[in-house]
Amino acid sequence: MGKRITIDPITRLEGHGKIEIFLDDTGAVDNVYFQIPELRGFEKFCEGRPVEELPRIVSRICGV
Amino acid sequence: MAKLKLAIYWAAACGGCDVAVLDVHEKILDIADAADILLWPVATDHKYADVEKMAPGSIDVCLFNGAVRNSENEHIAKMLREKSKVMVAFGSCAVSGGIPALANFKRREDILQRVYMDTPSTVNPEQVLPVTDCPVPEGVLHLPEFFGFVHSLNQVVEVDYYVPGCPPTAERIWEVVQAIATGNLPAAGATVGALDKSLCDECPREKSNKKIKRFYRSHEIIPDPQQCLLEQGLLCMGPVTRGGCGGQCISANMPCRGCYGPLPGVLDQGAKYISSIGAIIDARTPEEVKKILAGIADPAGTFYRFGMSTALLKGANR
């Protein structure tokens, strides 16, 4: 079994991310998983809000 | 004097609070002189594992922004609480849920269904939903659990100070940083970086105690820039919202959105606002009241725009 390297969190960007790198026995990269450990659900909670509100709500998807 | 050990973290947030810290412009150099940063994901490369290794109390002050939306947010909040002498709920999301807490109007399963199955841009023929433990050939990957309720920071850990705002303004942040650096803070539990009086108290607009016959949505009228917005029928949250923001929205001729949160002693900003509205509408019969209130497009989402974590009524997931 090779080595597992976890980069958590990934930094200097907006949002949350995590990378897991799996190395094989020779130390070469076998597989990489990029994960987004976050969800807020704008797609759903914008429903029911007045249309003129949306620019002021969705600007909070990313404030960077 | 030893440099202040500072951590700045974001949970369920947009990064606007982090950028607001940078909006102090060249004073950021003074912050860098006064403080060593031990964690700040938007700007520095420290990892959670680095923080985990620290002894309790290693961090002097943690500015925590963002709501607590999932188990990772909760885990990091608890870890930072343990490592920090002073925990600050920084920005509306940490203070009272903020915009992400509008999700408390929806059920967890409906959010997941919409996001991962139903949006027009989704292609997910195998109907895959995120899971907390995902077996892959190399081992098991872990994702946080998506909670059914969006929490404010003080619903998961003890909070020492509250700095409201979406985001807090740079001027107020600078005052808070100075207060922290000089140890000039009020008793724990206080709201700092905001006034103890309402936005109306510092609003330059003229009030004439006029009653209103109808409400307007912001695209339906161009309000008089000298007159009280609420008296012109716009849902301005000024009467029930702390001042200190500098009145940016009202100076742009837009009603206050309530992001600086309720006044001292007020438990529920939305309920307080309902009482303000009751005082201003000009109606003599229940029918007239009904007709005027029908002009409010989204009362719950408007009155609790930033406060659905701490509202007395808990939404769809109580």
Image: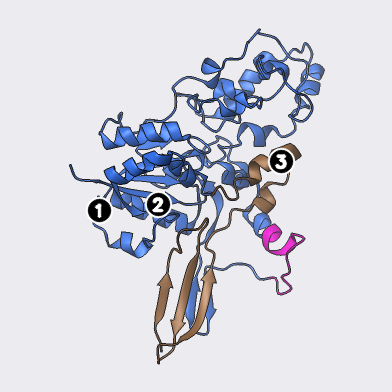
The chain letter for the residue carrying disc 3 is: A
The reply to the same-chain question for discs 1 and 3 is: no
Kind of residue at badge 1: Pro
Q: Which color is chain A depicted in?
A: brown
Q: Is residue B318 something that shows in the picture?
A: no
The CA span between labels 1 and 2 is 13 Å
Q: Quadrant of residue A48?
A: top right
Residue B218's spot in the image, x, y percent?
Answer: 73, 29
Quarter of the image with the N terminus of chain A in it? bottom left
Kind of residue at badge 2: Ala
The CA span between labels 3 and 2 is 30 Å
Residue located farthest toward the front when viewing the structure as drawn: B26
Instruction: Residue under label 1, please give it.
Output: B56
Residue B118 among those drawn in magenta:
yes
Residue A25 among those drawn in magenta:
no
Left or right of B38 in this view: B132: right
Instruction: Residue under label 2, please give it.
Output: B77
- Chain letter for the part of the structure drawn in blue: B
Q: Element under label 2?
A: helix
Q: Residues within 10 Å of mark 3 (few under 14, many from 20)?
A: some
Residue B97's spot in the image, x, y percent?
Answer: 53, 42
* Range covered by the magenta-colored residues: B113-127
Instruction: Residue under label 3, please give it.
Output: A49
